[in-house]
Amino acid sequence: MKTAKTLKENIGITSETGTLRKLLIHSPDRGLGKVVPSKAQDWLFEDIVHLDTMRREEYDYYVKVLLYFLDPEKVKGKLKDIDSDESRSFYIPGSKDYFNSDKVIDFQKLLADILTDPTTRSNLTAAICGIEKCTYLTQQKLHEYDPIELATIFISGSLSDKKMLFAPLPNLIFMRDIGIVINDHILLNKPAKSARTRESILAQTVFFQHPMFEKYRDKIIEIPENERHFLLPDDEKASDFQRCTLEGGDIMMVAPKHLLIGCSERTSIFAAQQVMKILFEKNVVDTITIIKIPKKRDFMHIDTIFTQVKKNIWVLLSSLARTGDEAKKKDVLHFFAQKKEDQEFKILQFFKGLENKPIEIDNLEDLLTDISRNDLGCDEEVTFIYSGNREFPFGEREQWTDSCNLLAIKDGVVIGYDRNDKTLEAFRDKGFRIIAAKTLLEAFENGSLTPDTLTNTFITLPSAELSRARGGSHCMSMPLLRD
């Protein structure tokens, strides 16, 4: 049994479904309310969202559920007071009523912590003002703000709710993408889109400067650029074999020595190759499976097309699984709408010491079955739950709204969106209890259910606004510690 002190200090991820003990999140901030239609796609949003609804009626449930499982003393018996507070101070880092958990940790709090150090504050302010092309006077003005407000400005791009200094970081709610824990190492990302450059700088500074990660500083991995990247012609810099981009949604630590890397719209083949070389050299893992998926906005990362629910259960998009050819024949219009190059899907598995002799795996189901049986030692039948319950056109419709993007709080207990009706129907068919976050929290409060005894459960979050941001519960978390 881990002590509270051990939990606070340690990080370690060896699976996707071990009981979650500590994670990073970021609650929707005022910057999300600044996204304008003309810049939405540049800032990687499909639409503008209603911030207050996203916070109060959706994301706040996510926080309360996580706290009830990971740090129940912060919420148990307090929900009425929390919900009746119009200011939402419980959720806002730096406010007097902030939940301030060391298990469910808001990235903004860590950023504010390190900004109390004058050197860190000065260096980070200069770096951000440099990339955002701020004036020298603006840079000097920022030094006048306290660390809590400065952290908010760096993330939201705005002074209070009025003046914007630079673009917001609306994608920071998707914490998975800034980095990933692989065993006891931390792999930092290299974002594919310029809209996320500031996120990367903030993440680097937090992981290298915050005391929480002090004993892991020699285990932080940054992916090197092509050493001659600055000499490459612009058209070659964009090549998948030259550019070095990687995001956490394309990385899954599925077993103690087995890592999955997706090569997607956001993660390049070159970056995957660099990660494999570093991890094998450091003996962090001994098996790396690279999953090349079509470079399409609706796929984006591998965690948008599959995630693990339980040791022996996975949810996935059937058109990319073993039944893919049959599904495409039924969906003739969808099949012919795709360009030939967009249909490319390939799985290669590499082993330490045999990097030049990868094996090719035909389909996702074979790969995931092998992980469950051989990596995780599961004796039970391996089961697949399909997006949209394999009914046309609901598979693709619900995958777009994150039916495959689920966060396992523990083996068999996952959080996802309430709007994917056909996928939820498929979960019911497999024996899962479907319960709304609000109903679950009420049951926890009255003692009719407890987090420890919950099994085979899909917890649904309200998702009208969250799903428009194009990321699910898996995206909205960066697990730091699992059993």
Image (cartoon, grey):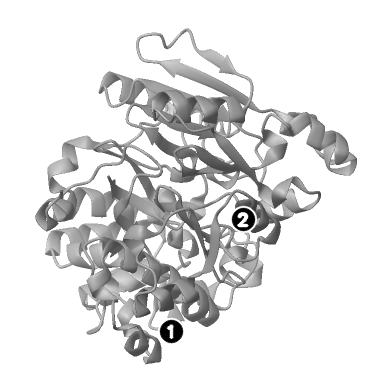
Q: Residue at x 41, y 71 (%)?
A: 156
- Residue to which mark 2 is pinned: 428
Please state which amino acid type lies under the numbered disc 1: Asp
* Image location of residue 237, percent across then percent down: 54, 32
Disc 1 element = loop
Binning the other alpha carbons within 10 Å of mark 2 as few (below 14), some (14 to 19) or many (20 upward) gives some
Q: Residue at x 50, y 51 (%)?
A: 194
State how far apart marks 2 and 1 are (Cα). Answer: 44 Å
Q: Kindly identify the amino acid type of the residue bearing the numbered disc 2.
A: Arg
Q: Is residue 148 visible?
A: yes
Task: Name the one closer to the observer, 149 or 401.
Answer: 401
Secondary structure at badge 2 equals helix
Q: Nearer the viewer, residue 245 or 318?
A: 318
Residue positioned 13% across, 47% down in the render: 214
Chain-order first, disc 2 or disc 1: 1
Classify 332 as above or below 361: below
Which quadrant of the rendered structure holds the C terminus? top left
Side of 263 relative to 128 (left or right): right
Question: Can you tell which mark lies on residue 161?
Answer: 1
Mark 1: give few (<14), some (14-19) or many (20+) Cα within 10 Å. few
